[in-house]
Amino acid sequence: MTIHRAEMLKILAEAMTPVEREYTDIELSVSGTLPPALNGVLYRNGPGHFERGGVPYGHAFDGDGHVCRFEFVHGRVRYTNRFVRTQAFCAEEGAGRMLWRGFGTQKPGGLLANGLRLRFKNAANTNVIWQGRRLLALWEGGAPHRLDPVTLATLGEEDFAGLLRNRFDPLSRWSTPLLPFSAHPQLDAESGELINFGLVLGHPSRLLLYRVDARGMMATPEVHQLDRFSFVHDIAVTARWICVLLPFADFDIPRALLGLKSPAASLKLNTERPMQALLIPRAGGPTQLIDGVPGFVFHIAAASDRDDGGLDLHVIRYPSFPALGDVDGFFREVEQTGGLPRLERLQIDPAANRCSLSPCSEEVGFELPTVNPGRLGAERRQIYGIGTPVGRRLPFFSAVQRFDMQTGELIQQDLGADLPGEPIPTATRPDQEDWLLSLVYRGAERRSDLLVLRAEDLAIQATIELPNAVPPGFHGCWVPADPSEKMR
């Protein structure tokens, strides 16, 4: 199937149509057969608005968070969707115009409206997780928002009993009253412990590590000083290590603070300097900083310890920082340079103070990776994600895919001109393969379906039709049904 850039851009533009209606606990139509054992709730988050007062957002990371809930009960599916009612969302809804700067969006009004405006909109649009009997909508630059797990009503910002209160210098406290809590926490499915991070700009800049136990109780955040403030989206956690990849993707902080550029527009990647791997022992002790390889990593697919004391990471690496605010420009650059994000194996050897990189699958792009839940650092065999169909030149992520880390086998389910979202596994242990759930935007029909795919071969088992079109989003989670518990 050949898809030209103009057609692809048209489909993407149509997919970004704002969500206009919220539904409450309606039953959805199912084609095919739902697996009898598939009982639980799928939560999924992504931007649902792409403009405010007629002014388009300059980056997908600025779109207002919109959470979908799919409840599977004995072969039937019920659906609820809600926007996250953050302070910014409610204020801008009332005003009918943009009131905050975003990660990639300047307020109308030039320097006067943006200069020294150090509080950015928390869009709560990147992930949604269930941990410690809390449902949290996440955005990496701010605090989590707690949601009702049944109705999706917004219950307010979550500060973990005050431990996210910013107690650093006055300027930091004023610009960021609550410390940032990343959208990519690492959850140990065996112990229930959650490990997350946040980055705080300052002199010095700081990396904060958070540990939240299975009851939802946070320990005092651990503070690590950084020589520079960079852009980090994800971390790796194994039994021995917490690994933070620090690319030389740095913000032009003076221009961003003065309002001359948005943070995203001021971000530049130095492709001649390698990423650095910051290794923090989980049991405590001195940290180690190791020069790695050039490029930029949004997502780390899997991480495990080696017997020799090192660690293996499977990462999605971009050769240059993707200009996601300019989709046409990004696709044009990829066509010219072949710069698709690839799944690669990054081996880190602390004893030798070095890293090495090897490709996993050179011919296709890879993004939004997922693995089965389990103990942090446990070896996984399969990585799921979305990708570019083999032989398709354009960077059109229209396939769900499965990569076997032991054999190197890649399986794809090509969806043609449709846009699949992150495939979320419903397995309950690392060595199990049962089902994947992926929300798909149908380009030709301009609507959305939820697909149930068999994980081992990506065969489509069932298609669940939504009553509305949902834009391609980011991340989500599966909560298996537990007969001994209710969601609240």
Image (cartoon, rainbow, N blue to C red):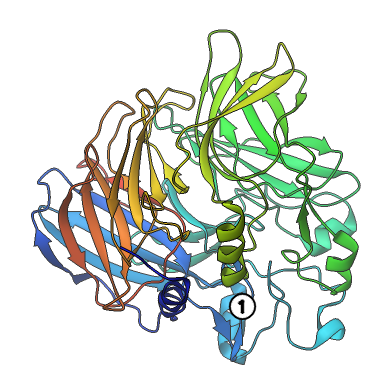
The percent position of residue 135, horizontal first and vertical second, equals 43, 54
The percent position of residue 78, horizontal first and vertical second, equals 21, 65
Compare residues 353 and 196 and report the one nearer the observer: 353
Q: How many marks?
A: 1
Residue pictured at 22% horizontal, 49% vertical: 453
| Left or right: residue 300 compared with residue 425 | right
The percent position of residue 416, horizontal first and vertical second, equals 30, 63
Compare residues 409 and 121 and report the one nearer the observer: 409
Mark 1 neighbour density, 10 Å: few (under 14) some (14–19) many (20 or more): many
The percent position of residue 47, horizontal first and vertical second, equals 49, 69
Residue pictured at 63% horizontal, 28% vertical: 242
Image quadrant assignment for residue 83: bottom left
Compare residues 62 and 10 and report the one nearer the observer: 10
| Left or right: residue 100 compared with residue 169 | left
Determine which residue is flagged by label 1.
Answer: 57
| Left or right: residue 252 compared with residue 336 | right
Residue 309 seen anywhere in this rendered image of the structure: yes
In the picture as drawn, the residue positioned furthest to the top comes out as: 308
Residue 131 seen anywhere in this rendered image of the structure: no
Q: Is residue 44 above or below residue 458?
A: below
Amino acid found under the numbered disc labelled 1: Tyr
| Left or right: residue 83 compared with residue 415 | right
Q: Quadrant of the N terminus?
A: bottom left
Image quadrant assignment for residue 403: top left
Residue pictured at 69% horizontal, 75% vertical: 105
Q: Is residue 374 above or below residue 471?
A: above
Element assignment for label 1: loop
